[in-house]
Amino acid sequence: MTITIRRGGPGDAPLVLGMLDSAVEWLVSQGRTGQWGTGSWSENERAVELVHRYTAQGTPYIAEVDGSPAATLTLSKGPGPYLEPADEPERYIHLFATDRRFKGLGAGAALLAHAAEETRRAGVSLLRVDCYAGDDGKLVAYYESNGFTRTEAFTVGEDKWPGQVLARRVL
């Protein structure tokens, strides 16, 4: 098995949506609907718009396992509008997802390591990400197992969706 990482672009938005849909399907099958609900990203107009915006304005990366797209993330210069940017230059991870057919093969961890290296290459020392912090906390623990440290908790929206910002120093 070989994992390679390629730089993506706006044309990869359908691929990114497919991976996010795969993640939602898996979460729903596990009874874990608090993170992204029960509907697919590709059928939600706002989610489709968000993916197109991030893949056009940020830098998407695709991890491939033996040539098949397995995971994705997009790097940008700051967080989404629901969070304050850092008080220093940063790179921010958005749209991180693994196609569940490739779960456990290391594609997600390889992408996170690649994001750290790209941040370092840009001369930036701070890499941040935010994620769902509800349920059993496994997602937060996953980021921690990949070198990130919790920095601040937050909530979004009327339903008080629980989130966690995590950071990693790369220089």
Image: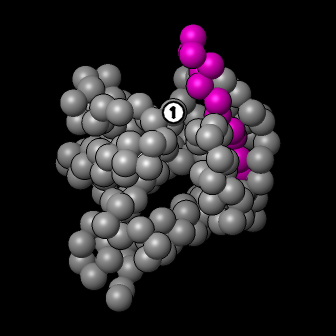
Name the side, left or right, on which 98 lies relative to 163. left
The quarter of the picture where the C terminus appears is bottom right
Residue 156 placed where, x, y %? 60, 21
Residue 11 placed where, x, y %? 20, 48
The one of 33 and 142 positioned closer to us in this rendering: 33
The quarter of the picture where the N terminus appears is bottom left
Which residue: 75% across, 40% down? 88
What is the span of residues highlighted in magenta in the rendered image?
156-167
Q: Helix or strand or loop: what does disc 1 sit on? A: loop
Outermost residue, top side: 158
Residue 142 placed where, x, y %? 63, 59
Residue 62 placed where, x, y %? 35, 62
Q: Mark yes or no: residue 133 visible.
A: yes
Question: What is the quadrant of residue 50 in the picture?
Answer: top left
Name the side, left or right, on which 48 lies relative to 117. left
Q: Mark yes or no: residue 130 visible.
A: no
Graded by Cα atoms within 10 Å as few (under 14), some (14 to 19) or many (20 or more), the crowding at tag 1 reads some
